[in-house]
Image: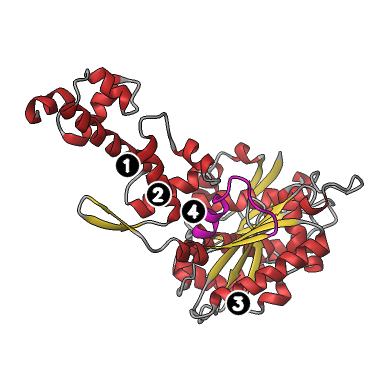
Amino acid sequence: MYRVLIVDDEPTILKGLRHIVNWGDYGLEIAGQASNGTEAMEMMGALNVDILISDIKMHKSSGIELIKFVKDKGLNAKCIVLSGYDDFEYVKEAAKLGIENYLLKPVNVDELTSTLINTVEKIERETSKELVVKQGLDILRENILNRWINGDIEDHELMERGQLLNIDFNVSGYLVAAVKIFDGAPARMQSKSRLHSQSEHSANDICADVIANRARPCKSFYGPNGLSFCSPNGEVIIIFSNLAADNYGEVTKSILEKCVTRINESLNLDVFITAGSYESKFQNLHDSYANAKKLQEYRLVPPRNKIVSYGDIADSQSGEHYRRDGRVEKAGPLVRKTIDYIKANYEKNINLKTISSNFDTSAAYLGYLFNKEAGEPFTDYLNKIRVEKAKELLLGANMKIEDISKKVGYINTNYFFTIFKKTTGISPSEFKRAFS
């Protein structure tokens, strides 16, 4: 268990932090608490603290003085500071000293949890206790960027914290690319018996190698307005900004192609890169990331050293229309093939998993795409087709309702009754009496 010391001159904060999360769930325990920096300094060495959570302004010895004490003494403790809205100058000073994150009061549970997870992961990644501070803003930077791409940060907070990272928000044209790193032997070299495999390394270790200063393979390509960092699941995330709407596709594709080559050659690793949608505003960056992640699920087996762009997929899937319920809907080729498959095989035991395997894509991605382009969930559409066929049989065939149920794909007759009534408002027998 990693040991945590909490420092704050407000008793309610001290009490609240002890109970705000289940510390044991993250491999942590509260080793002690102090009401000021002086008291905390006396406790630090004796308690062998791994993580220090301290208020930045206190009556006796501020959080700044406490962090300086930790650094000057060479204590291997990760520092997280608590601050009010008017403490920004103190935070900037603390960031220079090396902190993992700063949390505004009242503390947000989700942000605290995210910070603890990232901090514990950082501790576990460090191979030596001598690495006290790798870089003062690393975890703070990753926390902010992760929250930005996931849409978990308010605009004013992002802009304020962005000042610490020198992020320029006075530009337009944003796009997120997700780089999946294959941690096994490169596919192009798997036949070589002496190949050194990367499989003993975690995804996070490899990701850290890729974007570390000593092996940053893409930084020279995407320029001063590009940012890269590791996501919690071990992917390299690249944020492009200041892109022109008329040529962003060519620019990002050229850069990412160079990234693939550089990673292949310098680190002997294979990758799969997906580029999300183009967004004109930084507030919509999370949409670009979401689209990049959805493309990661496009293929059951991700291709190695390929780049898939959301813009290319969107362009190829715009076109033909399907008319449903008096409305016109756009559908791309994958959804059109799915609709055709349903109409041809509705009587069989089909579902998203069986259909997606035929089309070399994932059930999750096909379900998302179908709902988006057909305007309703896959299951609802399948049920509508089956009910329409059941109506035809009820009116035109001399069959028992139980046989009709099986004929249109429902083995369970009671379930067929439920779906039919939910769709039409009446039971199959009532329908037959009313319209035959």
- Amino acid type indicated by mark 4: Asn
Residue occupying image coordinates x 63% and y 41%:
26
The local secondary structure at tag 2 comes to helix
Q: Which residue is mark 1?
A: 381
Please tell me which of labels 1 and 2 falls first in the chain. 2
Residue occupying image coordinates x 74% and y 56%:
270
In the picture, measured across the screen, residue 171 lies left or right of residue 199, that is left
| Location of residue 61 with respect to 427 vertically, above or below | below
Instruction: Choose between 396 and 379: the one closer to the eye.
Output: 396
Please tell me which of labels 4 and 3 falls first in the chain. 4
Tags 2 and 3 touching, CB below 8 Å: no
C-alpha gap between disc 2 and disc 3: 30 Å
Characterize the local packing of mark 4: few (<14), some (14-19) or many (20 or more) Cα atoms within 10 angstroms: few
Q: Is residue 49 in view from this perspective?
A: no
In the picture, measured across the screen, residue 421 lies left or right of residue 12, that is left
**Residue furthest to the left:** 434
C-alpha gap between disc 4 and disc 1: 41 Å
C-alpha gap between disc 4 and disc 3: 39 Å
Colouring method of the image = secondary structure
Give, as a single range, the part of the protein colored magenta.
Answer: 291-305
Characterize the local packing of mark 2: few (<14), some (14-19) or many (20 or more) Cα atoms within 10 angstroms: many
Characterize the local packing of mark 3: few (<14), some (14-19) or many (20 or more) Cα atoms within 10 angstroms: few
Is the magenta region chiefly helix, strand or loop?
loop
Q: Which mark is residue 251?
A: 3
Q: Which residue is mark 4?
A: 108
Q: Which residue is mark 2?
A: 370
In the picture, measured across the screen, residue 96 lies left or right of residue 366, that is right
Please tell me which of labels 4 and 2 falls first in the chain. 4
Tags 1 and 2 touching, CB below 8 Å: yes
